[in-house]
Image: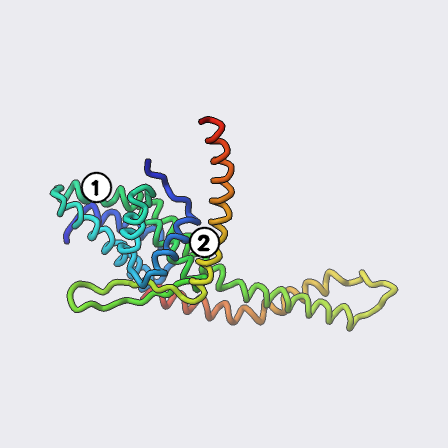
Amino acid sequence: MANHQIDQYIKTVSARLKRLTPAQRAEEIQEIRQHLEALIAGYVAQGRSEDEATGAAIRQFGRAEQIGRELGGAWALRQVRRLWPYAVAYVSLVLLIFGFFALANDQPSDFPYGWANQLIMALVLPAGMFSMGLIKYLRHRRALRRG
Amino acid sequence: MAKELPRGDVATLILAVLANGPAHGYAIARSIEEKSAQALQLREGTLYPALRVLEQQACIESAWDVQERGPARKVYTLTEAGRSELTQRVAAWDVYANAIAAVLGKGRLSYG
């Protein structure tokens, strides 16, 4: 069904889904297009013109800008949730390493001495371990985005 | 008078519809419209963000259903986790609705 209004609608939603891979975006778009086309078919069956039917279908579906934003938000939430375990692992490692340093350099009389350096080391070391994973992940994402 | 649905309620209604069997997005919207006798106004596009969140929570699963005629459609199915989530939501809703009804009921009597 060639429908300029629908194409424009899809384009606006799509612009809000830039963070998705092409395959994920294509699935979302296909679903939305099918839904809109089904609504239009229903209104046309009731005797409305194609133009009127499209307008009514879009009103019933919601403004493209808003729907796109909500859908993009739902996906962003999904990505954050996927990264959550890594964040927990990082913080645990930092605490573990910091604890190790604190014990290894145990000098109760001047405990605060050098704690800042130890904390920096504890933050940097796991970051180094994670950076390889992060680079891999970013490359993977870029490859997916290119399709 | 049609009432716009709050976001959390959309998710609950989706779970309730899927408890009757798998369905695609358009069918979920029609089912909500039909059962509420058009009293609940749903911006149907909001179904999809809610579906994504429910998928993420493993309450539902989706798969493309290839049809003999016409294009493939994405069909959603309730999982066991989704079924127990629905049970909890229905119980919480009952408590809420009964409490409101109890207060409103007393109010109405005094107006009568």
- Local SS, label 2: helix
In percent of width and height, residue B33 lies at: 29, 47
In percent of width and height, residue A11 lies at: 27, 50
- Quadrant of image for the N terminus of chain B: top left
Between disc 2 and disc 1, the foreground one is 2
Identify the residue at image location x=11%, y=43%. Answer: A47
Residue B9 appears left or right of A131: left
Which numbered disc covers residue B9?
none
* Nearer-the-camera pick, B29 or A17: B29
Q: Amino acid at mark 1?
A: Gly
Identify the residue at image location x=40%, y=62%. Answer: B55
Q: Which residue is mark 2?
A: B90
Circle 1 packing at 10 Å, graded few (<14), some (14-19), many (20+), is some
Residue A57 vertical position relative to residue B84 in the rendered view, above or below: above
Task: List the single residue furthest toward the top.
Answer: B111
Label 2: chain letter: B
Residue B106 vertical position relative to residue B55 in the rendered view, above or below: above
Residue A117 vertical position relative to residue B90 in the rendered view, above or below: below
Q: Which residue is mark 1?
A: A55
Q: Amino acid at mark 2?
A: Val
In percent of width and height, residue A136 lies at: 46, 71
Residue B34 vertical position relative to residue A85 in the rendered view, above or below: above
Total tally of numbered discs in the picture: 2
CA–CA distance between discs 2 and 1?
Answer: 36 Å
